[in-house]
Image (spheres, rainbow, N blue to C red):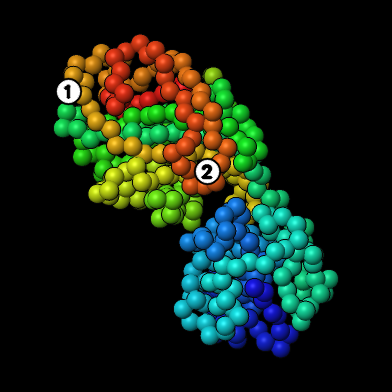
Amino acid sequence: MSYTHYHTTSPTSRTGRKTLKYKRSEPVWSIDLEEALLQGLAEYRPSSARDPSLLRRFPRRNKWISNYIFQRTGKARTAKQVGSRLQQLRETCADTEILGLIVNKHFPAVHGSQHSPSVSGESSMLSSSSPSPTSPSFPIIPSPPPMRHHFAEIAVTLVVHGSDLYCGTQIPTVTLDLDENGFSESSYPNARSFTHRAELLSADYLSQSPPEIKFSAQSLQDLSRRYRSVCSVYCDNELVYTDEESNTHLHLAFFDELSRYVLYGLKLVPEFWANILSNPKGTSRYKIVQSIISVDMDETPYADEKILFVIRYSLETGSILPEFKEQNLPASMAIGGPFLQNHHYLELPADNNHDLPADSSFGLAYPQYPTFPLSTDALPLNFQYLHL
């Protein structure tokens, strides 16, 4: 699809929408902003490797258009504002060309990379009736730097245990050392991946409160940057939830000034976790894919972003053995307390097919020769693997 610009008609007259006031002297969607919105909509291409027609959503479209608008006009409109505007147009606009841009999932091939916004003439999807990119209406602006796709890929299996034997009240916590040997930064899709198991133990409390995931890594020690998390939930390989538009950031959970040791954390999909556990067909149908992205402290759209880690969570339902009551555990293994235990991992060949969402064919790494009684079904821990 392409967007046709007409000199004699403004975008507002075609969309049929009145502009709302953004500031006292500035509408939210002035003519130039609406023009940039429609141009960005025409030039957007999904970054997913999957067939676009099979996608249920348009990955990062609102964010992409938000960045495009800023690059073309110098005015910032958030991804949420873009999404709201597109929804308004979808419901009220009578222009078939614009409606096609909003809902169409068949994207013509363009020159150059599909992963980075471009406003150059070569990659422009404007029709022949559009003004030249060198005209005053289309100033040539350098393309913003694309998000770099070099990251470490980690797979974690969360084994969810529910038991009347559990009498703790703390939120189940998993702490991941993302600098573990084997987590080397590499180019997608050849990133190495193997799976760690982390146990989540509680009674009904777990279903009400999602687990807290904490991260330590050398690349997370730059306190001049922020770290954003984007989670997508898949059920039977179909996307059912994403928090992409919620702008979730990791919070600083711990910082030691002397050693410069930093822990960041967040709750895992808090708005959707209860849906996962309440599914009568089981939790194993769900996969959670989390991207941890380093962003500049500057709020300006298109501030330098870099994907640092992609963590793929598989979910299992576990069981708990009666002999592992909390009161029978040694102090070092008490529920909610820190548990530092070195394991020897045997790495199995990793599956090279890394198309999202994750599947159960990951290569596995599992502990050998643990120094405590181990059931293959469960470990009664809710604080797992500070140093994996």
| Amino acid type indicated by mark 2 | Ser
Image coordinates of residue 196 in percent, x first then y, are 44, 28
Dot 1 amino acid type: Pro
**Residue beneath label 2, please?**
291
Residue drawn at the location 76% of the way across and 82% of the way down: 129
Q: Residue at x 48, y 20 (%)?
A: 346
Using a 10 Å C-alpha cutoff, classify the residue at mark 2 as few (fewer than 14 neighbours), some (14 to 19) or many (20 or more).
some
Badge number at residue 364: none
Q: Does residue 148 sit above or below 85 in this rendering? A: above
Can you give x and y, in whole percent of width and height, for residue 214 in the image? 43, 32
Is disc 2 placed on a helix, strand or loop? strand
Residue most extreme to the right = 134
Residue 13 appears in the rendering:
yes
Q: CA distance from mark 2 to mark 1?
A: 37 Å
- Comes first in the chain, label 2 or label 1: 2
**Image marks 2 and 1: residues in contact by CB distance under 8 Å:** no
Q: Quadrant of residue 11?
A: bottom right
Above or below — where is 333 with respect to 23? above
Which of labels 2 and 1 is toward the front? 1
381 left or right of 86?
Answer: left
The residue at 21%/20% (across/down) is: 324
Instruction: Report the residue at 49% width, 53% height from top.
Output: 244
Q: Which residue is mark 1?
A: 322
User: Residue 253 location in percent, x, y?
Assistant: 43, 32
